[in-house]
C-alpha cells in the first residue's frame, strides 16, 4: 500500500507571454488523487469569483488500493470558490491537524486536517465524485457534469463509520447551488457536516440533505457548455451541450426556469472529451485521443438574409477595450454596418460575410442586465436579444 508522502500539488496558474509559457501560480496546495482525479474545469461567476472543479481522492468515500489509498481531505470532491479579485487574495493553501494545530501538508493524513486560517479558497458545493466541467450560463445558473463511481474501486461510505459494496453508476448533470450536497462522500468534511458522510445514488430523490441530478447520462460524460446561438430560429438557444468521451455530443433541453431538464438527446457523434460553442453557431469537439478538433457547423435553411447568431464573449468589462466577435450570415461592408449593445454603438474593426469584429462599447454606469445586440448590415436589422452582460 502507498504510504506517502503525498504533497498537495494541485494548483491553478496564470499563463502569460507570447506562447503562454510564463507560469504564475495563483492557487497552490490543492488536493490531487493518487490515481486520476485532479483539478478539472473552471469558470467565473458574474462577480468574478473563480469556481474550480476538484475530483475526489476516493471512489465513494472510503480509501482504497485502486484509488491510491489516500483519504478525502478538506477541499476535494467539490466545486471550490476563490474570490481572486479580493485585495490581498491568499491562494496559498496549507493544512493544519485538527487535534494539534500543527502544520501537515501530506495528503496521507488528509482525513484529520483543516484548511489553515487566512486562506481564501473554500467549498462552494460539495459531493462531487469527479466534476469534470462546469458552465456559468447567461441566466446566472451553474451546471456541471460528474463522473459516477466504479465497481471494484473502493467501498461506499454510508455513514461516519459504516460502508457498503460499490457498483458502477452513471454520470450526472447537476444544477449546482452554493451549500448543497450532491452525494459523493467526504468524511473529512463529514466531521462537521453529517450529510457528507453518506453516499447517495443518482436515482435517489432530492431531500433537505441531498440534491439529486437533473439527468443521468452514460459514463464518461465530461465537457459541458451553453449553446447561445439563435440558429434554427433559436431552437437550441440556452440548451446545454454535454460531451460523452469517445461517444456522442448530447443536447440537454432545460425547462424555462433552468431548474430541470426536459430531455437529453444525442446531437452528433464526435468522440471528443469536451466541447465548446464558437461564433456563428459552430460547436468544437476536442478529441484528444486522435489529436484533433472536430468542427460541427450549423446548416440553417431559415437564414435566407442577414442574420446575427451570437456574440463572443457574452460578458466583459465596460472600459471599451474588450474585443468581440459576432457570428452570422449575410453581413455587408464595414462602412455599411453598425452594431449597438444596450443602445450604445460599438467600434467595429473588421467584417466578413460571416463575422463582425469590434470592441465592446465603454459604459461609465453599466447595468448587470443582459443587453440586446443589434446589427444593421446589408440593409437589414438583426437583433440577438439579451445577449451581452457587463461585468
Image (cartoon, rainbow, N blue to C red):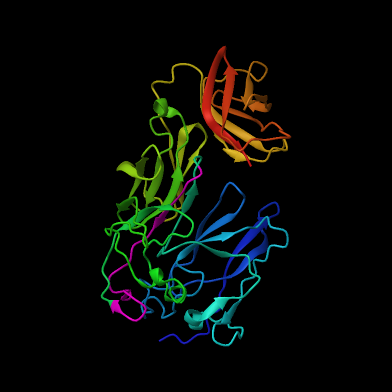
**What residue is shown at x 60% (from left), y 84% (from top)?**
101
Horizontal side of 353 relative to 245 (left or right) equals right
Q: Which is the main secondary structure of the residues drawn in magenta?
A: loop
**Horizontal and vertical percent for residue 82?**
60, 60
Q: Is residue 125 visible?
A: yes
**What residue is shown at x 56% (from left), y 49% (from top)?**
45
Horizontal side of 51 relative to 166 (left or right) equals right
Quarter occupied by the C terminus: top right
- Most extreme residue toward the front is 208
**Horizontal and vertical percent for residue 13?**
63, 61
**The stretch drawn in magenta includes residue 162:** yes
Image vertical order of residue 90 relative to residue 6, above or below: above
Q: Is residue 269 visible?
A: no
**What residue is shown at x 47% (from left), y 52% (from top)?**
134
The quadrant where residue 10 appears: bottom right
**The stretch drawn in magenta includes residue 135:** no
Foreground of the two, 358 or 106: 106
Foreground of the two, 57 or 336: 57
Quarter occupied by the N terminus: bottom left
Image vertical order of residue 217 relative to residue 149, above or below: above
Image vertical order of residue 25 relative to residue 141, above or below: below
**Horizontal and vertical percent for residue 264?**
31, 44
**Horizontal and vertical percent for residue 50?**
58, 55
- Most extreme residue toward the top is 379
The quadrant where residue 131 appears: bottom left
Total labels: the figure holds 0
Horizontal side of 23 relative to 114 (left or right) equals right
Which span is picked out in magenta? 140-163
Amino acid at each position: 500500500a502507498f504510504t506517502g508522502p503525498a504533497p498537495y500539488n494541485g494548483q491553478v496558474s496564470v499563463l502569460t507571454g507570447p506562447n503562454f509559457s510564463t507560469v504564475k501560480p495563483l492557487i497552490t496546495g490543492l488536493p490531487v488523487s493518487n490515481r486520476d482525479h485532479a483539478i478539472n474545469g473552471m469558470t467565473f461567476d458574474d462577480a468574478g469569483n473563480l469556481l474550480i472543479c476538484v475530483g475526489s481522492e476516493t471512489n465513494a468515500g472510503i480509501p482504497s488500493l485502486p484509488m491510491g489509498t489516500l483519504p478525502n481531505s478538506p477541499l476535494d470532491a467539490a466545486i471550490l470558490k476563490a474570490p481572486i479579485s479580493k485585495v490581498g487574495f491568499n491562494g496559498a493553501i496549507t493544512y493544519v491537524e485538527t487535534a494539534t494545530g500543527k502544520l501537515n501538508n501530506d495528503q496521507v493524513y488528509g482525513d484529520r486536517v483543516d484548511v489553515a486560517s487566512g486562506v481564501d479558497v473554500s467549498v462552494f458545493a460539495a459531493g462531487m465524485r469527479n466534476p469534470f466541467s462546469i458552465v456559468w450560463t447567461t441566466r446566472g445558473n451553474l451546471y456541471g457534469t460528474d463522473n459516477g463511481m466504479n465497481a471494484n474501486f473502493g467501498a461506499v461510505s454510508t455513514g461516519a463509520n459504516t460502508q457498503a459494496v460499490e457498483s458502477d453508476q452513471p454520470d450526472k448533470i447537476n444544477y449546482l447551488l452554493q451549500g448543497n450536497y450532491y452525494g459523493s462522500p467526504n468524511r473529512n468534511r463529514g466531521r462537521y457536516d453529517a450529510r457528507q458522510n453518506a453516499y447517495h445514488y443518482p436515482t435517489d430523490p432530492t431531500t433537505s440533505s441531498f440534491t439529486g441530478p437533473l439527468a443521468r447520462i452514460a459514463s464518461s460524460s465530461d465537457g459541458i457548455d451553453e449553446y447561445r446561438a439563435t440558429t434554427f430560429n433559436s431552437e437550441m438557444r440556452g440548451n446545454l451541450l454535454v460531451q460523452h468521451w469517445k461517444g456522442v455530443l448530447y443536447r440537454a433541453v432545460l425547462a424555462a426556469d433552468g431548474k430541470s431538464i426536459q430531455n437529453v438527446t444525442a446531437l452528433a457523434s464526435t468522440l471528443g472529451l469536451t466541447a465548446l460553442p464558437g461564433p456563428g453557431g459552430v460547436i468544437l469537439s476536442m478529441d484528444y485521443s486522435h489529436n484533433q478538433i472536430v468542427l460541427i457547423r450549423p446548416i440553417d435553411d431559415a437564414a435566407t438574409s442577414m442574420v446575427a447568431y451570437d456574440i463572443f464573449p457574452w460578458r466583459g468589462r465596460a472600459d471599451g477595450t474588450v474585443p468581440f466577435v459576432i457570428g452570422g450570415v449575410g453581413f455587408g461592408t464595414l462602412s455599411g454596418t453598425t452594431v449597438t449593445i444596450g443602445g450604445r454603438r460599438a467600434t467595429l474593426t473588421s467584417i466578413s460575410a460571416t463575422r463582425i469584429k469590434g470592441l465592446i462599447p465603454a459604459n461609465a454606469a453599466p447595468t448587470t442586465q443582459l443587453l440586446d445586440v443589434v446589427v444593421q448590415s446589408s440593409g437589414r436589422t438583426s437583433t440577438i436579444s439579451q445577449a451581452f452582460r457587463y461585468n
